[in-house]
Image: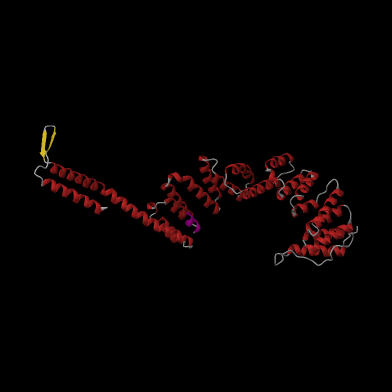
Amino acid sequence: MKTGFTIIVALLIGALAAHLALPDNGYALINFRGYIIETSVPVLVLLLILAYLAVRTLVHVWQAPRRLGEAWARGRAKQAGKKATQGYIALAEGRLAQGERLLTRGARHSETPLLNYLAAARAAQMQGDRQRRDAWLNMACEQEPAATDAVLLTQAELQLEDGQFGEALASLNRVRERQPGHAQALKLLGDLHQRRREWQPLAELLPQIRRHGNVAPDLLDEWGVAAWSNLMATLQADRSALERIWADVPRHLRREPRLTLARAQALIACSAVDDAELEIRRTLNEDWSEALVQLYGQLGVADPAAHLKRIEAWLKEHPEDPALLLAAGRTCVRHQLWGKARSYFEASLALRATPETWRALGQLMTQLGEMQAAARAFERGLSMATTTPQSGAPATVALPPPPGRIAI
């Protein structure tokens, strides 16, 4: 570029010199408000060139401070970028204090000061310093006022991780004052209610989260199951309140075993045992659940014969389900089918011994007058209840398998 400009200037000067050598090199007259300037054309051209160069020189001199400032700023930004990169590397390698120091040193001159301060705040929290964490977040707000909501959401997330639930709620409320349907704010608020076990506020918030939030459907369903099942568990024989809660449960969750269990227990508390039996039976036909099976075996329904018939029908599909065998034994006890009940209890114990099954067998033996067998059953159940297997696997006992035909 400079070489080309030099060649052009040299050509112009050469042309001008050649023109000056001519016998008639032209005549120029300038009359401006009574002032008359007479000169030859080559001299006029030379004067114009000199004037142009003078103007360009003055412009460069005038812009020099700004250009120097820009160059200095670019240098500082480049240096700040290097420090930020080194800071992120330090954080990734677990050198938290060094990473925090590198990220904040010269952060004001960085091209991404907001990211620097947010990362530094996380590093400060990981070191257990809440005060320094909040200081970096405040500086982030000062540096980027337009990103206040992003800073508040980061602050709420960090406060949640640190167990500062009240402070997190205040941060989220500040965001929702400006944007009530902010997706991330709704997600963090739902997480807050779930962690604090605030089931009523969580249940009320779920429709908004479903509309505006960015919560995965599986997690949203888990929150709903936790909220509605716990709310139903707190009811005190209030059928109308139970139905109001149930009306809020989405249809795709109404056969969820945990919700069915909570609803069935609430129905039993309302003396609606047959309704509870119907709910459990419908769910078990679609989704097998040991907890529901256990509850089903304890129901005192109006038609015990049909109740036992359904359990035995399920046994054809689940012949080695210890919970179902226990339920069958309990139902047989209510029918006074003592031999059948004992066979079912022993079959259940052969598959998986539990204190509950030993206790049921002990009660049956007591009722039959077999006190020694009852004492042994109670003793084994008590022993299992007070000791935990080392391996964590359920204990089993060696009992003969149930006969193909069970006698009454």
Q: Residue furthest left?
A: 23
Indicate left or right for 311 with 254 as reference.
Answer: right
The residue lying at 55 percent from left, 41 percent from top is: 181
Q: Is residue 80 above or below residue 401?
A: above
Q: Quadrant of the C terminus?
A: bottom right
Quarter occupied by residue 356: bottom right
Quarter occupied by residue 145: top left
By secondary structure, the bulk of the magenta-drawn segment is best described as: helix
Indicate left or right for 373 with 290 as reference.
Answer: right
Q: Residue furthest top?
A: 33
* Residue 12 x/y as whole percent: 18, 48
* Residue 111 x/y as whole percent: 40, 51
Indicate left or right for 154 with 288 as reference.
Answer: left
Quarter occupied by residue 238: top right
The one of 350 and 229 positioned closer to us in this rendering: 350
Indicate left or right for 307 with 59 as reference.
Answer: right
Q: Examine the rendering and report whether any part of residue 101 can be seen.
A: no
* Residue 317 x/y as whole percent: 80, 55
* Residue 39 x/y as whole percent: 11, 40
Q: Which residues are magenta?
A: 121-126
